[in-house]
Image: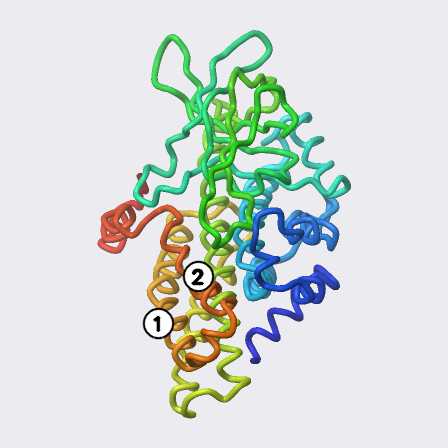
Amino acid sequence: MRSLEAARAVCERYHPGLLKELEQIPYSEREKPGSPVIDLFRIHGGVGLVIPEEFGGHGAAPLDALHAQMAIGAQSPSLAAAVSMHHFTAAMLYSLATARGRLTDAQSDLLRRIVPDQQVMASGWAEGRTEQNILTPSVTARPVEGGYLLSGSKKPCSLSASMSLLTASIAIHSLEGEPELALALVPASAPGLTVHPFWGNELLAGAESDEVRLEDVFVPKDMVVRAGEDDPHRLDDLQTAGFVWFEMLITAGYLGAAASLVEQVQERKRGTVQERAALAVELAAALALLEGVARATGPEPGDEASVARVLVARYGVQNTLPRITSQSLELLGGLDFVRSSGHAQAAAAAAALAFHPPGRGAAAEPLLHYFDGGPLVLA
């Protein structure tokens, strides 16, 4: 199938041999707890996909990153979901790192070690509750001499077993004023950081989405990214860049899972020509929505229009996925369903897009307000 083959060619260019190695592992083995897929991702240069070349990465453009994620999602939805967290974290942090003075020297030095050391970064931003306030941290920070003590948890937290670094949104509490939103860079080896079982579903189990707990974890001041008088928009730009990349890449991964089913329908010539064409058109339309977002995403952090654009694409794809997957399973037939669970699992995994924040309920009023000419304010 043309669109998926094109995506695979992009993925092969950045991660030579990865898709072939994934294909050699049975689907159930790729998706189970303890799966080797994240290690394979690291071995094949996955860490540096969106990291700028000056920091040792590939510096992939958004459109290439989108296609690479789609190809990975077609092979392993667990891997696509997991590495979306790494990639959007990288896009977010390096958007500041490439501008002089927006990160401390210590923070920039840390980011320069990510690719050479093949470090995977986990994200401690929004949790798995679709209607929650996506900007409210679940980790608090108490100022102490030389830094902060972090306490709280992130659940689920993908890449929890493989991460070298946790990037956690934190609320800094002081004696006066409202808590301040900031971002902490926490080594996975930090005393007080522990990982606990949380994920109980067989679907997407290879993403390592367990609970990460922080109990009085010390983080030096220079490993906390804060807004300040010298750069009052630092955190706003960080969040906008991260949000756009996250929604784009997580959606692409799930669309890849659905595309793998459509490909099987086309290759096996299941159903009528009209049915196969209708299915291909739905997939192409969903992909075109995402590609439009990718083409409009530049090196700058973005703005309200960028956020609105990616939300429209995400919800448009989310609406389409159930039709694509259910029709694909129907056309593949009952014997396919009986003989192997892989296709049914891919279809079910694609439905998980609906559980990533922000849920449609949380975004509905802000989007309508924006479409009517007002500002876009997500809660």
Q: Residue, x 54% and y 54% (percent of image)?
A: 78
Q: Quadrant of the N terminus?
A: bottom right
Check the image and report above or below for 365 versus 333: above
Secondary-structure class at tag 2: helix
Q: Position of residue 35 (x, y in %)?
A: 63, 51
Q: Answer whether residue 330 is visible to the viewer in this image.
A: yes
Q: Position of residue 274 (x, y in %)?
A: 39, 90
Q: Nearer the viewer, residue 170 or 365?
A: 170
Q: Position of residue 96 (x, y in %)?
A: 58, 38
- The part of the image, by quadrant, that contains residue 74 is bottom right
Q: Residue, x 38% and y 20% (percent of image)?
A: 179
Residue at mark 2: 350
Q: Answer whether residue 280 is visible to the viewer in this image.
A: no
In-image side of 53 versus 285 (left or right): right
Please, what is the three-letter code of the amino acid marked with disc 2?
Answer: Ala
Q: Quadrant of the C terminus?
A: top left
Q: Residue 271 has which mark? A: none
In-image side of 16 versus 184 (left or right): right
Q: CA distance from mark 1 to mark 2?
A: 11 Å
Residue at mark 1: 323
Check the image and report above or below for 221 versus 25: above
In-image side of 75 versus 105 (left or right): left
Label 1 crowd bin: few (<14), some (14–19), many (20+), radius 10 Å: some
Q: Nearer the viewer, residue 90 or 337?
A: 337
Q: Residue, x 73% and y 43% (percent of image)?
A: 118
